[in-house]
Amino acid sequence: MTNQNDLRRHPARSLDGARDMAHKAVQLVTKAARANLTAEHDDSHSNLGWKGDLGAFVSQPLPGNSGDLFVGLNISRLSLMIVSDGQAGPSLELAGVSDSDAGEWLDGQLAQSGLRAASPASLPYDLPASAAGIKVYATDGLGDALATLSAWFSFAEVQLERFAASQAQLSPGPSPVRCWPHHFDIATYVGLEAGGAETNRGIGVGMSPGDESYGQPYFYINPWPHLDADRLPGLLPPGHWHTQGFVGAIATAEEVLSLDNIAEKMPAFVNDAFAIGREKLGV
């Protein structure tokens, strides 16, 4: 369980440098999966899970010659790691390391397990320019920011897992809570009718570490198809409606930290916004 003081360790609006470093570094993890797993139609082979005891995002299991292993990225230390049998193995702290050298180290670790190199794998998306331009990982002065970013991911994972479990009776229901490395958000998608997510009704529930919409971490509950922005009811604290570019219920990090009882009021906000989404979608 995340200590809520950890969420306040560094100002929520000043996590962009840490976020960019971690966003770039986590591409090494997903490239290892892309190089070694059969591609899924929804790209889910490349997504990541949060392993709270390691403070790390980890890949899907990779079939090494001595059993499955995982590639991970510890966020607070910004270190690559190899994980097997639930335990962290060899690791590389990325401070002062070039992206190409980090890839070379990872390729060597993968080769020892009979796996293909990650470096040649291509990404089917563009990163934000601030992350894409990083050639050498420079973490000086980012220690508190990286630790705070890690705390937000850990907090979000707990909130989202509990929410997903509470909606397990729905069909198709909630997807596993995973991080999607192109946007670097952690989320579940609750399908509300059978069929593809792009054409059938559902609600995405997740947390972004910050982007062009909000320069800080934020939780979102986004119904699909988009709701009518002119006919939206009130939300429980700490939420508000976002209506520019997408329509969704939002709670920024600063709004979350304004609550006098985060443990009770955050789940209440998420559940209420989800219920509003279902009502508006008519399912």
Image: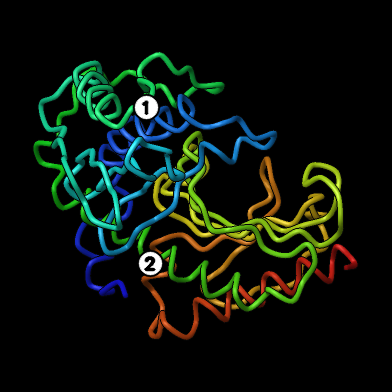
Name the residue located 43 percent from the left edge and 38 percent from the top edge. 63
Q: Looking at the picture, which amino acid does disc 1 mark?
A: Leu
Image side of residue 235 versus residue 224, left or right:
left
- Give percent across and percent down for residue 124: 56, 21
Identity, as a three-letter code, of the amino acid under mark 2:
Phe
Quick one: label 2 or label 1, which is nearer the N terminus?
A: 1
**In the picture, residue 262 is in which quadrant?**
bottom left
Residue at disc 2, secondary structure: helix
Residue 194 placement (x, y as % from top left):
86, 55
Residue designated by label 1: 115
| Label 1 SS | loop
Residue visible at 51% across and 69% down in the picture: 161
Q: In which quadrant will I find the C terminus?
A: bottom right
Q: Residue furthest right?
A: 282
Q: Nearer the viewer, residue 67 or 107?
A: 67
Q: Viewed as shown, does residue 209 lie left or right of 94?
A: right
Q: Residue 124 carries which label?
A: none
Q: Do the residues labelled 2 and 1 touch (CB within 8 Å)?
A: no
Residue holding disc 2:
155
Quadrant for the N terminus, please.
bottom left
Residue shown at the point (48%, 17%) measured from the top left: 122
User: Is residue 212 placed above or below 117 in the rendered structure?
Assistant: below
Residue situated in front as seen by the camera: 78 or 105: 105
Residue 217: give x, y in percent of width and height. Answer: 41, 53
Q: Which of 206 and 89 is in front in this view?
A: 89
Using a 10 Å C-alpha cutoff, classify the residue at mark 1 as few (fewer than 14 neighbours), some (14 to 19) or many (20 or more). some
Task: Find the distance from the CA under tag 2 to the CA under tag 1.
Answer: 33 Å
